[in-house]
Image (cartoon, grey):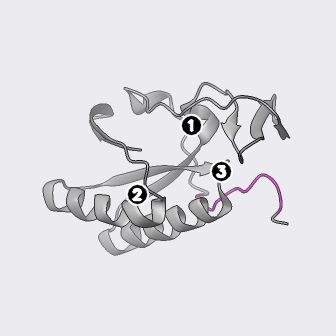
Amino acid sequence: MVGLYENGVKFKEISTQDHVSEALIEILEELDKDYNIQKIIYANTPGSFMGLKVAYVILKTFCEVRGCEFYAVSGFDLNENNPIRANKKLSFVKYDNKIVLEEKEPVKFKLPQILDKLKLNSDTLPDYIIQAV
């Protein structure tokens, strides 16, 4: 899911079911042709280890090459702190400042209409929440 914003207000949204490794480069190439991208914000937690790594590398590289600002937000900021899919059975669930795995129905992400309420983090490294097995 990719949102385009001007002056902090969303004017376009792109969604795909493709893996980030397949879709993100194509989306960035198309958007880079049509828009002057100045800032990229991505959800760096929680989620698929591979998806987070791939998104980070692609987006960080793009920002370095193009001189864009780069920020991260928690995925929980994009679904009102509801459970986020971890695998087929488990979801990441946030209780206060603690995140655990539980059998709960995940809630899909929703891009905000206005960016001003997002808590931007300049520490953009993926935060995997739990260690890889």
Q: Secondary structure at mark 3?
A: loop
Q: Residues within 10 Å of mark 2 (few under 14, many from 20)?
A: some
- Residue beneath disc 2: 69
Depicted 127 relative to depicted 60: above or below: above
What's the CA distance linking mark 3 and mark 1? Answer: 18 Å
For marks 2 and 3, the one nearer the N-term is: 3
User: Identity of the amino acid at label 3?
Assistant: Gly
Contact (CB < 8 A) between labels 3 and 1? no
As for residue 125 lying within the magenta part, the answer is yes
The CA distance from mark 2 to mark 3 is 23 Å
Nearest the camera: 17 or 79?
Answer: 17
Tell me the tag on residue 45: none
Q: Which residue is mark 3?
A: 47
**Amino acid type indicated by mark 1:** Lys
Cα separation between marks 1 and 2? 15 Å
Check disc 1: other Cα within 10 Å, few if <14, some if 14-19, many if 20+.
Answer: few
Q: Is residue 70 left or right of residue 66?
A: right
Membership of 13 in magenta stretch: no
Residue tagged by mark 1?
A: 119
Q: Position of residue 122 (x, y in %)?
A: 56, 54
Image-based side of 62 in relation to 132, left or right: left
Q: Secondary structure at mark 2?
A: strand
Q: Start and end of the magenta stretch?
A: 124-131
Residue 22 location, x and y as percent?
Answer: 41, 65
